Image (cartoon, rainbow, N blue to C red):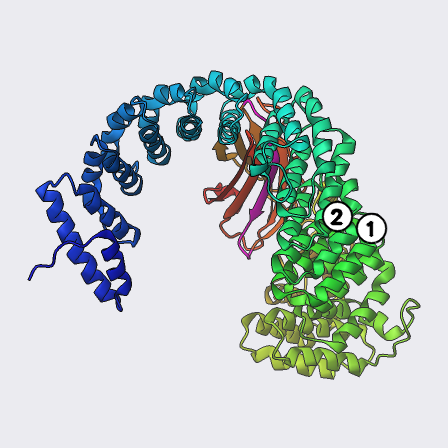
Amino acid sequence: MVMSSLKLQDLIEEIRGAKTQAQEREVIQKECAHIRASFRDGDPLHRHRQLAKLLYVHMLGYPAHFGQMECLKLIASPRFIDKRVGYLGAMLLLDERQDAHLLITNSIKNDLNQGIQAVQGLALCTLSTMGSAEMCRDLATEVEKLLLERSPYVRKKAVLTAVHMIRKVPELSDTFLPVCAKLLHERHHGVLLGTITLITELCERSPAALKHFRKVVPQLVQILRTLVTTGFSTEHSISGVSDPFLQVQILRLLRILGRNHEESSESMNDLLAQVATNTDTSRNAGSAVLFETVLTIVDIRSAAGLRVLAVNILGRFLLNSDKNIRYVALTSLLRLVQSDHSAVQRHRPTVVECLREPDASLSRRALELSLALVNSSNVRAMTQELQGFLESCPLDLRADCASGILLAAERFAPTKRWHIDTILRVLTMAGSHVRDDAVANLTQLIGGAQELHAYSVRRLYSALAQDISQQPLVQVAAWCIGEYGDLLLEGSCEETEPLQVEEEEVLALLERVLQSHMSLPATRGYALTALMKLSTRLRGDNNRIRQVVSIYGSCLDVELQQRAVEYNTLFRKYDHMRAAILEKMPLVDRGGPQADEEVKESKEATHLLEPAPVPTEPQASKLLDLLDLLDGPSEDSQQPPPVDPSPEGTLIHLLDLPCAPLAPAPIPNLKVFEREGLQLNLSFVRPPGTPTLLLITATATNASEGDVTHFICQAAVPKSFQLQLQAPSGDTVPAQGGLPVTQVLRILNPNKAPLRLKLRLTYNHYGRSVQEIFEVNNLPVEAWQ
């Protein structure tokens, strides 16, 4: 028995009553078969009912493509009930990817010219939903005529359709410019709101439109003042705020018109101050208007007092009980911290309080803002607050917090001792979460502070005795004990509490590090080298050290085994040279012009001091082969001292001699980004003194007619690299080839691995916020080989 076709209501009830997915599919398959049969029979009276059922099936996720041509037939029908379902089907089943959507262009054009409001509304809704660029070009004239239609119902839909057309085809801007000025006098709320939206789209996409509509700023100011003082109509008021949607849209348009334009900004200053002081923020509607006001004040060329008022409003937002409002305030203050640092600095206590928020997104944003607020005057207080947060912060924030504290301490440290104490405390609390270069930076800092050697080794020894789980801390402590272990035993440091340490205790602690299952291979290497250096700094017998070193001669780790074998050989065959080889490391300066000059002087001195050929002992050449030390220190090290032309002196002289660098080949520049006139180019330099260091200069230029503001360039590299982003030269890229914005990226590539770079650009252009994330995989080979 063949089941008859169901009505729409019956179909819905039967589908909802299906107990399994198989039953639902069975019902839908049967009904789709009836719908196909009805379409083939060509029943004109019930075609709209069949299509309505098919649209419901489509909404459930089942295929309904066979109903596309029926939509075209219903749209062409003279009956309104057919047109209504046909246009709805076109909006759901058709899009730009299918050529069938172009077939309804003529039907829409006829319906727009019919004069029946309901039919015109259907056609406009469909055009604004799925109109392609070709349809927009063909129907722009009809939509322009309907913008002046008497019926506000049609005008409102025509304005929204014009917005869609501008987004699809920006070159149609000239078509709608004259009409918009007339529509600004509109009293109908929907039409006025749509007109403001249309003008906003025109200004964002056309510099000519932006210049044209700057003339109507006084009119927009008057409309907004009327809204604030007398209101538009009571039916559009929300929580006591007069028409917040229209206020927000006008403020956005004023922000675009006033950006980088002194006259327009001046004409809206008084109004913005009035809105900022009279808006009630007890409800979300008022907060939305006030936040939009703040954004407008910040983006235009407003008065200094007005900008301070905007920052204070954001400070009040931080005290709001709504988490979303607090998050928005923190994000906005983070954007302002560069341009209005002193004003944002006043709200530092409130920002620090937000660190304790249980919400992860709030605490992360508060952490970013707190780190941005650190300067030379408040570095002690802010670092103390951030260290307190580091003790209890979630694990996913520890790395960011620890790295931020270390960078702030490096930039604003008042004294070297304070700097060392700060890094030690961070390593103690979150050593496993710090950056890879933290160990190297701290060892360099301690090595350069000769007056703090005794203080540092005692602090590190005490910290190591309490906890050997934090690997970076253990590595620094082992290095420091190996270098300055003699100062640890002297007990002559007046800056710390008296600490009596015996030689056996120091050796036992390093052995404990070597035997700990928590120690990484690199950490064991630090400890083994420290033991070896202590053999020349301690006054006792070295038998215990020799026994420990000999044990690791058969270690499974190749690097550790090699070190142990070399150290054993020093004990057995070259004990008379051990003290000279294991001297304290010289201070290693960071790469720079001064370091390059020192390297040059070192080469000249080495050339002048080169002695006449002197016979060398066979043991010295064997030692060179054994220890494989001919690579010497890095080229940014200090100039080696003059040595005696004795066999041993010649050996040490050779060990410290830096290798002569090859002249670096020029590296070609690379263009990595271009959009709407904004271009980003990378240039590369490898300093001769540090071959593993690559300096990348990112240069942003703007050939368009609008300034690029709030420009931020962020970069990321693989974990085997070390990246440091220096401060950019600015955050605004002027239009028409103005002064470019530059930023230097310092990348350390110790393994000389192929370099990959991931960039994220965020900026505002023509009133739009843009974010671009892309990878750069085609860097020149000379940049890393």
Q: Is residue 778 above or below residue 415?
A: above
Q: Nearer the viewer, residue 434 or 157?
A: 157
Q: Are marks 2 and 1 in contact (CB under 8 Å)?
A: yes
Q: Position of residue 201 (x, y in %)?
A: 49, 28
Helix, strand or loop for disc 1: loop
Q: Is residue 565 above or below residue 251?
A: below
> Three-letter amino acid code at disc 1?
Asn
- Quarter placement of the N terminus: bottom left
> Three-letter amino acid code at disc 2?
Leu
Helix, strand or loop for disc 2: helix
The span shown in magenta is 705-720
- At horizontal 51% and vertical 47% (from top left) the residue drawn is 758
Query: On the image, numbered disc 1 is attached to which residue?
Result: 378
Image quarter of residue 335: top right
**Cα distance in 3D space between marks 2 and 1:** 9 Å
- 717 in magenta: yes
Q: Nearer the viewer, residue 679 or 16?
A: 16
